[in-house]
Amino acid sequence: MSAWVLPDQIADVLPSEARHIEELRRDLLDSARRYGYELVMPPLLEHLESLLTGTGEALDLQTFKLVDQLSGRTLGLRADSTPQVARIDAHLLNRDSVTRLCYCGSVLHTRAARAHATREPLQFGAEIYGHAGLEADLEIIELAKASLLVADVGSVTLDMTDVRIVDALLQGQTLSAAAQAAIHTALAAKDVAELTKLTRQLPASVANGLCALPQLYGDVQVLDEAQKCLPSSPLMDSALQNLKWLAQRLGDVRTTFDLADLRGYAYYTGVRFALFGGDGVDQPVQELVRGGRYDEVGAVFGRKRPAVGFSLDIKELVQAVAPRPLRPAILAPWGEQTGLRHAIGYLRARGETVVCVLPGHEHEVNEFHCDRQLIELDGQWLVEPLSKI
């Protein structure tokens, strides 16, 4: 094997794609800042026990481990930045007020999340701590939508659910952890036959409600249907009303509901959402953003604060949108004349890209779209369109 062959699903990022990724990274961070989010930069690696505290088996399996040559302790390379941001909110900032934080950095996965995905996502995310009301859920969804707008994702669909719907159905039932896990698996697979077997010993209203969930997907009318066929309880009514409240205020985006969607069930504590790009005709539909409410995330750090947020992979997002056009640049000759050096410095200070042509390379094509050229006319260095040259 060649020494320069990279590991599976790890890749170099070449100039045109790297430019797009970096421009989008800046735009996303600027968008979050306009909403009032402060940037934090958690470390790439931590002591393993700190990095994985309260995260569960799934993240443990996704985390690369190594030994610290200084201390001999086991370290982990982060597979998700959210627990780190929760630690920062709980221990380093330790604010009592509402805190808005955003982050952007590479994470590493032992296995790719899906076929053809990278094992080194560039994760961007935003979180609100300290507000339990739906206003925070609404703001975080609006910021997630704004992020896709910044990226020029054409067709966007919002899908929502609430994990408390299943909690409400199973409330008061004595089930083993294995039995609950089997029900969750059957719901995720929308396997009504398996659900029927698993719920035979449960009260009829509970069994019927669980078996109805796989059919409860579609537009906002699904929520009305859910109110009719699912047993009423304070927890159930709150979950359905919360989804209705959000849907009424997110009317500018196509919104769907899938009440049997249990991805991240052990992590989320309320509304969970995903944003999809693509219309299914000219562009394939794919999930680009995932988020929701996870009020338990800070409990393991000694501060159980309300929390809601989202994350996305910028590398994946770039693959889902059209390439951005190159920004115009200026072609300049190489030279040591004082006037030429001053002219180039002045243009660069104003934000222009000036590409100096090294001797003997005048006819080479470069990555930049040079539509102008710096030329000397009557002792002055002037910028002229290339067509005039």
Image (cartoon, rainbow, N blue to C red):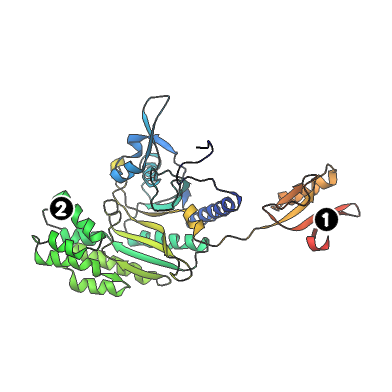
The residue that mark 2 highlights is 179
Q: Secondary structure at mark 1?
A: strand
- Mark 2 closeness class: few <14, some 14–19, many ≥20 residues within 10 Å: few
Whether residue 234 is situated above or below residue 341 in the rendered picture: below
Give residue 288's position: percent from left, percent from top: 43, 59
Whether residue 140 is situated above or below residue 177 in the rendered picture: below
Is 238 displayed left or right of 20 in the figure? left
Q: Residue furthest front?
A: 1
Looking at the image, which residue is at 21% across and 59% down?
Answer: 186
- Camera-nearest residue between 187 and 247: 187
Splitting the image into 4 quarters, where does residue 110 fall?
top left
Give residue 96's position: percent from left, percent from top: 36, 47
Q: Residue furthest right?
A: 378
- Camera-nearest residue between 310 and 93: 310
Q: Earlier in the sequence, mark 2 or mark 1?
A: 2
Residue type, numbered disc 2: Ala
Looking at the image, which residue is at 20% across and 68% down?
Answer: 212
The residue that mark 1 highlights is 382
